[in-house]
Image (cartoon, helix red, strand yellow):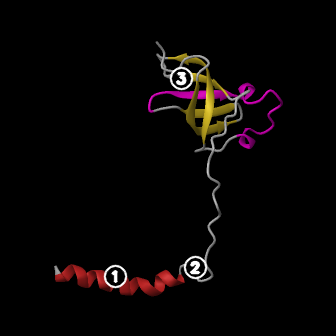
Amino acid sequence: MTKYEKGKIVTGCVTGVEKYGIFVGLDEYYSGLIHISEISSGYVRNINDYVNIGETIKVKVLESDDDTFQVKLTIKDIDYRMNRRKRSKIVETPSGFHSLSKELDSWIQEKYQEIIKK
């Protein structure tokens, strides 16, 4: 019996995006392709509008080949986005790395003293 049965919805990680489709890693052995025709019922102008590399998404299995460990996938007609926390942009402080450069020598000396005492 195949590990990824037809019609089953599973999660995977987007590993690549090409003009013709999206590559998805399902586990350490199986990988799949979402052909551009399986992304949306409408016209897909830019695949990058749908997914980002490294993103975890839900996919539906269309076909699975246990000999090659490859799976044909679709995201048509399913809510493929995973609930994920929104990332907030890292805001650099006005001093930037200057505070690090000010303290670095003293931190090195402290650690050095600690080490030679042992």
Q: Nearer the viewer, residue 87 or 109?
A: 87
Residue type, mark 2 in image: Gly
User: Residue 68, percent across and down?
Assistant: 49, 19
Q: In which quarter of the image is residue 58?
A: top right
Give the numbered dot on residue 116: none
Residue type, mark 3 in image: Gln
Mark 1 crowdedness (10 Å alpha carbons): few <14, some 14-19, many ≥20: few
- SS at circle 1: helix
User: Residue 36, percent across and down?
Assistant: 72, 29
Confirm whether the magenta stretch covers residue 11: no
Q: At x 66% / y 39%, what residue is drawn?
A: 81
Above or below residue 80? Residue 86 is: below
Residue type, mark 1 in image: Ile
Q: What stretch is highlighted in magenta?
A: 28-50
Residue that numbered label 3 is attached to: 70
- SS at circle 2: loop
In the shown orientation, is residue 98 left or right of residue 49?
left
* Mark 1–mark 2 distance (CA, rounded to whole Å): 20 Å
Q: Quadrant of residue 18?
A: top right
Q: At x 29% / y 80%, what residue is drawn?
A: 111
The number of numbered discs placed on residues in the rendered structure image is 3
User: Residue 59, percent across and down?
Assistant: 62, 29
Q: At x 68% / y 41%, what residue is drawn?
A: 51
User: Residue 97, percent across and down?
Assistant: 53, 79
- SS at circle 3: strand
Residue that numbered label 1 is attached to: 108
Residue that numbered label 2 is attached to: 96
